[in-house]
Image (cartoon, grey):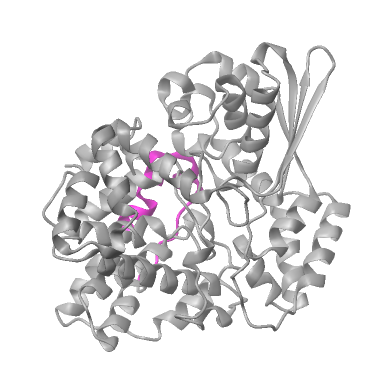
Amino acid sequence: MYSGYDSDLGPPIERAFPSADTPSQNAMRMASWSMVLDFDDVMLGGHTGHSSVLVPLAMANGHSGSELLLAQIVANEIAARINMVCALGSTRGQMATHLHLIAAAAARAKLLRLDADEFAAALAFALSYPAQTSYSAFLGSDAKAMCAGWPVRAGMESVDAVHAGLRANHDVLEDFFQTRTRVPVREFLDGLGERWHTATNSYKIYPACGYLCSAIDATLDLVRDHDVHSSEVESVEVSSSIFAIGMDAHSLPYLDGPRSRISTLTFSTSFVIASAILAHDFTPDELKRTWINDARVWELASRVRTRHDVALTLDALTADIPIGAALRHATRVQAAAFGSVAAKTAALPPLQTARLIAGLASSAGDRRPLDFSRSTKPLGARVSIRLTGGRTLRRRRSIPRGFAGCKDDVRELMRTKFVNAAIRVIGYERAAQSVTMIESIERLPPSSISRLTSALLFA
């Protein structure tokens, strides 16, 4: 949220949606800032944080820290389960805007202490009109910033509607499943309070699509360890999974050099990797227009090539996260069909297609109970940098730093990420104060929460 506020799109969003006394308006604009740079965190079930975290913060007045934390977890768990039922459909990732309808409604309903009937009605009301995001809006325009904000406001106001006496059809959930996927995996609806999606969180340390994070890790390891300068780079090859290859294919039509929108650049392998080589880092500064206009970035980007690696794809698709848990619980025929569609979308050659389909089919048909206690997110990549002297540097990263299953101190990574982003907006003193309070948020009374949100948020 802080990084989005400090971006080139931060001021226009603030002008378009000024601070108001309504929690739904404030949650919407915070969610919009949090979406701008693709700097969000994700769990098995989707990018819930735009709604599950920010709605309770927008409603924090009068609530204790434990109440806010409980509302966040409730929203995570409900929204992630519903989203995973239709994970084998056509809409996943941040484009699954229905996730925020559900999470925003669940968080608000929990904080307002709605009874079970009203809670169910609020969820049904929120899902009555699930939005469908278009690629041209999401990948090629500033409207991407609103893909969480608008559903957040609608989800929160659905609770208001139910609280005022309006009612929805409870069959809307089944209708939703039928329209979003031919392979609903209903096992995900079970296990509330026993199986925790929240515990599968993966945290980004770069403002880019999660599918690119391993490639950024590998690139930065190489350029820092070998002190590589862009003038030495002859070519770069990035081998990655079908997730990154498909993302690149979808974003490529909207890539327009220095005129490209931020929404496109966070999904562009060539831009991100070229920027990482030039800057020896990849931070929100590399998504500001001054950097984007630098001709050196685009000259180097023209030397970056991508290729698909079937082994990396099978590693990603057979692990729990992002959708392997759903694929394993599909039938072998359903998993093979999913692989066929994915291969066609990514334009894979026949041999790679056959290997992908066979690999997915062989891992399907699992009927064991779902268990996420050791879930990992291996969205791996291999990077090869060929230098002008003829030497080639190579590095592979299987699980990105901060992602589920990595060996890094994730808590320290998140603390550093928060402080670095917050300093630019609220200053070092308030950022440090906020970190200390967040670390013990479940013990804070309403009076302390009021002080926290005063330090944490901004008008």
Q: Is residue 355 above or below residue 238?
A: below
Q: Residue at x 57, y 14 (%)?
A: 296
Q: Residue at x 64, y 66 (%)?
A: 320
Q: Farthest residue in the bottom direction? A: 117
Please provide percent x and percent y for residue 217. Answer: 63, 37
Query: Start and end of the magenta stretch?
Result: 129-150
- Indicate the position of residue 449 as horizontal and vertical percent values: 19, 57
Q: Nearer the viewer, residue 239 or 60?
A: 60
The single residue placed furthest to the right in the displayed view is 351
What is the count of numbered marks?
0
Question: Foreground: 288 or 168?
Answer: 288
Q: Vertically, is 432 above or below 71?
A: above
Residue 53 position, x and y percent, is: 34, 58
Residue at 47% from the left image edge and 66% from the top image edge? 198
Image side of residue 401 versus residue 130, left or right = right
Quarter assignment of residue 131:
bottom left
